Image (tube, grey):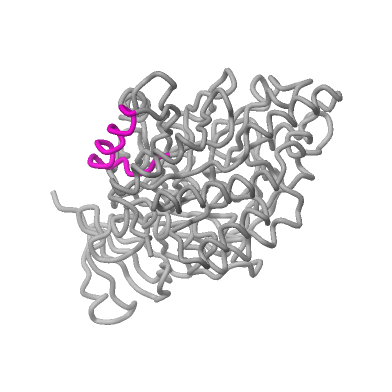
């Protein structure tokens, strides 16, 4: 049975264009666009018509950095693939790329199979996987080639978390050399974890146990040092590099310098670094634990460099690093020892809205909003133009967005499976109204009409953003 939907009267906003156009969807894909009110648009016929007058029609968001059900610090991220992808849909995100984890001593394949089992049949929206590489050896390196061939084309390594995910410079170099050959993209958590562990030990010995010290020991200079080191290792290997969750002025400077040298080096930041700060980490009565993540929140003055990086394209992507832990029973594991607070913030539902607020606040343009939240993550991770744009042939992942609706962000009204909001009480303008995933309504006029299992696993091609 063929199905056709037409979206009429909205302002279609993509990374490259803004046009008042009607959008025809057929069998889950964009079939055609035509300027509203023209004979071509009038000729569109459909089973279902969506009136988008006065609204934006934008591509579904692509969140290329989420951690559903991630084991960390003796507990698990509180969002399952079912709850997390449903919350993503509420926030206008229609594709996530989550991280499968290789445990030390196990194969990449074992980790990937484990994550497939968590996600399959449970997702409201489409999903793909990156692979966390925790154990670089000859077998792992061979497996990287096989994963690239089957659509897992990016590999994350950690310069942080010794004893858990940590890779030394030799392991990083070997993986980068392999990715230079097979077309994979190395994603790097750039913090000097060996040095940070020394500072953690010293802080705790001084009795500095509160959440705010999490930010003080994970110094911006140690993020910048690791970023510089990762860039130079990638340069030696002849490989592209994507640095995740960039938070500090000094780290942005390292990326900008590398890009000025013509290197294929890319950077991602997250809403928490753009909107929150060490002021949140310092909230009294252990409330600061809600804001413990790594890289950590920085003093407010770092925000200007991040916004500037997003405008100059020294930072290309805003993802969430969504990794929620409930305050009660999970974040509380670190009472009396900040190093035991599970690292991560909820945010998969808030990203598109916060970035729209950034448009209103004058930080970025409307088209840049779509570029950093939809188009570039799709290109960076081999999903474009299937995802990330509204054009004939693309998947009909479409959001009808009301740019005038006002809302207050709150745990009382969000759909993430976590007992607090990192943005509690924040007033913003702009809200998702209707969301289509491959032409199927997942959110319909602020009602959830999706289902677990609609979301399909999506293999990816290699990075489409290389210069």
Which quarter of the figure has residue 191?
top right
Which quarter of the figure has residue 148?
top left
In the image, residue 365 above or below residue 251: below
| Near-viewer residue (142 or 375) | 142
Give the residues in magenta.
138-155
| Near-viewer residue (225 or 267) | 225
Report the predominant secondary structure element of the magenta stretch.
Answer: helix
Residue 305, x across and y down, in percent: 67, 61
Name which residue lies at 24% across and 81% down. Answer: 39
Question: Which residue is at the far right?
Answer: 206
Q: Is residue 30 left or right of residue 446?
A: left
Q: How many marks?
A: 0
| Near-viewer residue (375 or 143) | 143
Residue 92, x across and y down, in percent: 46, 51
In which quadrant of the rendered image does the C terminus lie?
bottom left
Question: Which residue is at the far left?
Answer: 1
Q: Is residue 365 magenta?
A: no
Question: Which residue is at the far bottom?
Answer: 38
Q: Is residue 279 left or right of residue 177?
A: right
In the image, residue 320 above or below residue 132: below
| Near-viewer residue (94 or 115) | 115
Residue 181, x across and y down, in percent: 29, 47
Q: Is residue 145 magenta?
A: yes
Residue 147, x across and y down, in percent: 28, 37
Name which residue lies at 52% across and 69% down. Answer: 366
């Amino acid at each position: 049975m063929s199905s056709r939907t037409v979206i009429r009267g909205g302002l279609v906003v993509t990374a490259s264009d803004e046009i008042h156009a009607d959008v025809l969807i057929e069998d889950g894909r964009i079939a055609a666009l035509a300027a509203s009110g023209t004979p071509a648009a009038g000729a569109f016929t459909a089973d279902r018509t969506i009136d988008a007058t006065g609204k934006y029609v934008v591509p579904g968001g692509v969140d290329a950095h989420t951690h559903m059900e991630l084991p960390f610090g003796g507990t698990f991220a509180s969002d399952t693939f079912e709850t997390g992808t449903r919350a993503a849909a509420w926030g206008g995100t229609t594709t996530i790329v989550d991280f499968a984890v290789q445990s030390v001593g196990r194969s990449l394949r074992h980790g990937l199979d484990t994550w497939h089992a968590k996600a399959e049949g449970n997702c409201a929206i489409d999903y793909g996987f990156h692979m966390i590489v925790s154990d670089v050896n000859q077998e792992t390196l061979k497996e990287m080639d096989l994963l690239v061939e089957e659509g897992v084309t990016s590999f994350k390594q950690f310069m942080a978390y010794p004893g858990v995910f940590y890779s030394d410079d030799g392991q990083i170099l070997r993986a980068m050399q392999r990715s230079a050959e097979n077309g994979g993209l190395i994603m790097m958590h750039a913090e000097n974890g060996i040095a940070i562990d020394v500072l953690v030990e010293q802080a705790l010995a001084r009795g500095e146990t509160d959440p705010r010290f999490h930010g003080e020991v994970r110094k911006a200079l140690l993020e910048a040092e690791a970023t510089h080191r990762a860039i130079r290792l990638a340069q030696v290997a002849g490989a592209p590099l994507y640095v995740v969750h960039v938070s500090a002025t000094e780290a942005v400077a390292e990326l900008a310098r590398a890009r000025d040298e013509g290197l294929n080096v890319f950077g991602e930041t997250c809403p928490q670094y753009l909107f929150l700060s060490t002021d949140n980490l310092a909230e009294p009565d252990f409330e600061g634990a809600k804001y413990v993540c790594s890289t950590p929140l920085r003093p407010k003055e770092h925000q200007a460099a991040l916004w500037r990086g997003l405008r100059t394209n020294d930072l290309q992507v805003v993802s969430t690093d969504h990794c929620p832990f409930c305050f009660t029973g999970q974040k509380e594991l670190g009472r009396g020892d900040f190093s035991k607070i599970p690292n991560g913030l909820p945010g998969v539902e808030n990203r598109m809205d916060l970035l729209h607020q950034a448009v209103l606040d004058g930080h970025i343009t409307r088209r840049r909003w779509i570029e950093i939240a939809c188009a570039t993550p799709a290109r960076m991770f081999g999903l474009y133009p299937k995802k990330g744009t509204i054009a004939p042939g693309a998947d009909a992942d479409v959001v009808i967005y009301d740019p005038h609706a006002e809302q207050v962000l709150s745990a009382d009204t969000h759909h993430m499976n976590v007992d607090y909001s990192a943005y509690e009480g924040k007033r913003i303008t702009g809200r998702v109204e209707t969301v289509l995933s491959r032409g199927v309504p997942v959110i319909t006029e602020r009602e959830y009409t999706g289902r677990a299992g609609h979301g399909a696993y999506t293999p990816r091609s290699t990075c489409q953003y290389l210069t």
